[in-house]
Each structure stands twice: as structure tokens, then as C-alpha cells.
């Protein structure tokens, strides 16, 4: 990409502004064509209500690290034990032995319901997930029967190339700054999953709740 195109790209793609109604509809149609269910909501509270409707009582639930889950109030529900589910992360974090905790973390990728967010959605339908450790990627890609992503509409970008750029140029620096402000060394990009499609024969439910607000990073 030459300097002129880089400048044009920078002036036409925003990583933090909400997508337009037309962009949302294009992304919705493209994502659904790839075997992923999308529900559109207007507020974080409505997103939380949708999540509660999707997950049945007594289901095993695991979450990836997600600012979005914190912002919609889902992590608060889990921490307060104000839910009817089996919180696998609580059991994992309660284990003090590192080896046992590691085994519980690996087993959690088989959770019947795995929740988190994504870093970018292309209007062409590809979804990009970035991770420091990759711990949530097996569940998203294959091992969980039910995946639920909650995503702010600012994460919609025109193309897959723009989605990958959003990870490196926006999401990663934002997460790095957040962690350093909390006293941690910072963020590292370990693995990237490009979700092209969900094969019907897998008979999984991959759900994307798209919030028409800036939610998450």
C-alpha cells in the first residue's frame, strides 16, 4: 500500500465511530450468510437481556476476557452470583494450584456456552478475534456448542484488511494502555482468529448480539 493510499485509508475508516444504518445492514446480511445468527439491539441493557434469554438455567457458562461483558453488566451478574448458571470461570479462578487451574482452563473451552466479544466485523462478513493467549479461540472456532458474542457497532469496518488493521492500530494499543493503567506490563497480541463461516454440519449456534452503541474497544 503506497503513501497516498495509506492517507486515503486513514481519512475514510474510523475505528471508534458507530457504523451507519446502511453499514450495519450490509454487515448483518454478510455475517448471516456465513452461518452466524445476528440480533440487533439499541442499548447495552438490551444486550444483557438478550444474553439472559439465550442461556438456559443450569447451563455451563465460560467467558473470555472482555471489556464489553463488563460494560453490559454480564460480569457483574457472574461476580454477584445473580444468575441461574454454572460459572466455570469462578471454579477455575478459585483453584490455587497452577497445574489444576490450567487443566480447568483447558476444560472450560468445552463449556456449552462461551461468551465474549470480537475485535472487528467486516462489512463483507468476516469476523476477527484477537487474543493474547488464545484461550478462548478453541471454543469460538469449534469446541463450544453455543457461542455468544456481544459487539458494539463501532467495530464494523469495510473490509477484512480494515478489520485486521483495526486489531493492530486501535484495539491492541487501547488494551495495552488499559492494562498499564492498572499496573500490568501491557498487552501482547498472541493469536488472531479470522472467522470465515460456521459449517452447518457442526450444528453449533454462533450468536452475535450487535449493539448500536459504542461498547467495548
Image (cartoon, rainbow, N blue to C red):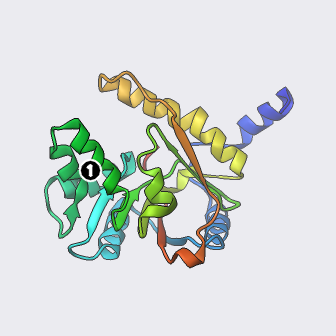
Q: Count the numbered circles shown.
A: 1
Task: Pick whichever, 128 or 191, lies toward us.
Answer: 191
User: Residue 69 at x, y = what percent?
Assistant: 34, 53
User: Residue 78 at x, y = what percent?
Assistant: 20, 56
Residue behind mark 1: 104
Query: Residue at left 13%, top 55%?
Result: 80
Examine the rendering and report whether any part of residue 110 can be seen. yes
Query: Residue at left 54%, top 51%?
Result: 154
In this picture, residue 89 sits left or right of residue 180 = left
Label 1 secondary element:
helix
User: Residue 18 at x, y = what percent?
Assistant: 56, 52
In this picture, residue 131 sits left or right of residue 89 = right
Label 1: few (<14), some (14–19) or many (≥20) C-alpha neighbours in 10 Å: some
The image shows residue 85, relative to residue 165, as above or below, that is below
Task: Pick whichever, 205 or 41, lies toward us.
Answer: 205
User: Residue 209 at x, y = what percent?
Assistant: 46, 65
The image shows residue 65, relative to residue 169, as above or below, that is below
The image shows residue 75, relative to residue 201, as above or below, that is above
Query: Residue at left 14%, top 63%?
Result: 82
Which quadrant of the figure has residue 6?
A: top right
Task: Pick whichever, 170 or 102, lies toward us.
Answer: 102
Examine the rendering and report whether any part of residue 210 can be seen. no
Which quadrant of the figure has residue 47?
A: bottom left
Query: Residue at left 34%, top 68%?
Result: 112
Amino acid at each position: 500500500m503506497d503513501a497516498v493510499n495509506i492517507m486515503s485509508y486513514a481519512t475514510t475508516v474510523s475505528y471508534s465511530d458507530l457504523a451507519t444504518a446502511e453499514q450495519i445492514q450490509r454487515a448483518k446480511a454478510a455475517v448471516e450468510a456465513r452461518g452466524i445468527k445476528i440480533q440487533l439491539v439499541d442499548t447495552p441493557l438490551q444486550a444483557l437481556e438478550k444474553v439472559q434469554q439465550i442461556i438456559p438455567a443450569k447451563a455451563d457458562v465460560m467467558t473470555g476476557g472482555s471489556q464489553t461483558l463488563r460494560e453490559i453488566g454480564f460480569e457483574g451478574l457472574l461476580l454477584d452470583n445473580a444468575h441461574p448458571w454454572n460459572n466455570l470461570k469462578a471454579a477455575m479462578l478459585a483453584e490455587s494450584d497452577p497445574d489444576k487451574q490450567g487443566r480447568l482452563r483447558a476444560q472450560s473451552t468445552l463449556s456449552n456456552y462461551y461468551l465474549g466479544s470480537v475485535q472487528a466485523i467486516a462489512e463483507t462478513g468476516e469476523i476477527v478475534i484477537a487474543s493474547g493467549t488464545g484461550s478462548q479461540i478453541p471454543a469460538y472456532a469449534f469446541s463450544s456448542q453455543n457461542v455468544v458474542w456481544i459487539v458494539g457497532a463501532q467495530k464494523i469496518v469495510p473490509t477484512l484488511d480494515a478489520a485486521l488493521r483495526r486489531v493492530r492500530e486501535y484495539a491492541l494499543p487501547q488494551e495495552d494502555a488499559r492494562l498499564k493503567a492498572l499496573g500490568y506490563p501491557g498487552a501482547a497480541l498472541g493469536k488472531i482468529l479470522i472467522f470465515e463461516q460456521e459449517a452447518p454440519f457442526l450444528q453449533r449456534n454462533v450468536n452475535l448480539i450487535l449493539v448500536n452503541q459504542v461498547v467495548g474497544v
